[in-house]
Image (cartoon, coloured by chain):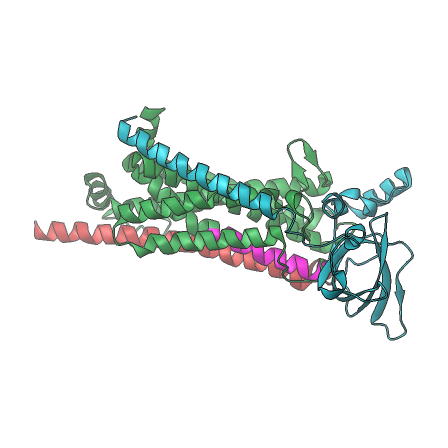
Amino acid sequence: MNIAEFFQMDGYALYVWGAYGVTLVVLALNVMLARQQQRKALRAILRAAQRDRSRA
Amino acid sequence: MWLWIHKFGSPKYFYSVSGKLLPWVAGATVLLIVMGLYLGLVTSPADYQQRETVRIMYIHVPSAWNSMFIYLLMAVAAAIGLIWNIKLADIVAAVSAPIGASFTFITLVTGSLWGKPMWGTWWEWDARLTSELILLFLYLGYIALQSAFEDRRLAARASAVLAIVGAVNVPIIYYSVQWWNTLHQPQSLGVGMSTIHLSMLWPLLIMALGFKLLYVVILLMRTRAEVLERERNNAWVQELAQALAGRDFFRSGNEYR
Amino acid sequence: MTPRHRRRLMFVALILLGVGVAAALTLNAFRGNMVFFYGPSQLATVEKAHERNLRLGGLVEQGSVKREDDGLTVHFMVTDNVKSVPVIYKGILPDLFREGQGVVAQGRLNNEGVFMADEVLAKHDENYMPPEVAEALKQAGGNTPQFSTTVMEGGLNK
């Protein structure tokens, strides 16, 4: 099997790669958003801690 | 058992244990999915009937399993939160919903992309397809209900009832292909039976395990973030903040230490 | 477990029980009516079959597919191995359409008993295997895997 054949998927490239593409995008978005939420939470806590320290 | 639930149900304990667990689970997930992709896309054969489109199975079926599994887990967590008032269970249920909705969406889209060339249609109102679409609406309804209440406790209680009621849809999806004549074919895998050739079964099972672990990874990540947000005024979070204060954690993935 | 917990547990159990019973009753009532397609034998029993749009499901009979010269119109027989119904369809067929394969056609029965389809969908079975294995099975058993009975089980048993 050569590379071109692999990407053509016997004429079903649009369907097969479309399915894998959608899956990748949705799952990657899930991981990215989860990571972003964690950063946001940590940033908020750090900011609050610094505010407390400067007040003390 | 009760001791264990209360210990693990404590947000502080959960945060430290899950933090240690996360890199290992994430590593195993990447390994399994890369292996599953290689086996599924490269080494496994084309199907005698469906030719190359059979490769859609390696993401469609694991996503479908996840969509049902996550719903049941969400309903059980919501019920535990409702009965025993355990905050962590409420969080697990709440953050599972968008992940489950994502897998349901993937199931429907990949199924559609598979149905068009093989069956000749993007969509058909048969029992399997319709009940899976209802699952997506249940997830979306649950998410909407969660955000409809200012008070978290109230939101958790109201949405828990919906999650529990909606759980009847899961066995309906599962058995739909047996109960009714559908365009969708009967199930290929069950306890002790399989009508899938081994060369295609292995990539499927490995991908299924990889997708399951991926759910665990996203679940842990979101639950940790949610715990931090909800517990920000507690002493242990403050201590954590002090310990992290000097570190440049935004650059190198240190946010998970 | 405190009495309060027990009360809530009962509450959840009651919801589940109530919804479960309601769902079971509804599904049971629908069982006969939720027919996605009729098999050729069933079609004869359908009342006023000529006046309704319905779906016919079965296997495409071996050797029955004939194409007209326009290249678009197809004649074939749909069978459940007991009865057969002739079908005429003009349009693009799905890639899985072939003799011996499961098929679901949507359309109307005309007065001559010919099913005039305006949509033809392919229904495949739950078997997945490489072509070499299918070929070997065919040679060993004589029974081609396409003729797997389960593909039409729904249409035949209910």
Q: In the image, residue B65 lies at what x, y percent?
A: 56, 44
Pick the residue in front: A6 or B12. B12
Q: In the image, residue B176 lies at what x, y percent?
A: 61, 46
* Residue at the (49%, 45%) spot, across then down: B214
Q: In the image, residue B102 lies at what x, y percent?
A: 49, 53
**Picture quadrant where residue C47 is located:** bottom right
Q: Which chain is cyan?
A: C
Q: Which chain is red?
A: A
The N terminus of chain B, quarter of image: top left
Q: Count all numbered tags in the image, as a single digit.
A: 0
* Residue at the (67%, 54%) spot, across then down: C36
Q: In the image, residue B46 lies at what x, y percent?
A: 75, 51
Q: Is residue A42 magenta?
A: no
Tell me if B84 is positioned left or right of B109 in this view.
Answer: left
Q: Residue furthest front?
A: C47
Tell me if C144 is positioned left or right of C39 in this view.
Answer: right
Pick the residue in front: B228 or C21. C21
Q: Magenta part mainly helix, strand or loop?
A: helix
The C terminus of chain B, quarter of image: top left
Tell me if C130 is positioned left or right of B161 in this view.
Answer: right
Q: Does any portion of residue C47 appear in the rendered image?
A: yes
**Picture quadrant where residue B192 is located:** top right
Q: Residue furthest bottom?
A: C70
Q: Please provide the residue range marked out in magenta.
A: B101-118
Q: Does any portion of residue B66 appear in the rendered image?
A: no
Residue B14 against residue C69 in the figure, above or below: above
* Residue at the (77%, 51%) spot, across then down: C42
Pick the residue in front: A4 or B202. B202
Q: Which chain is green?
A: B
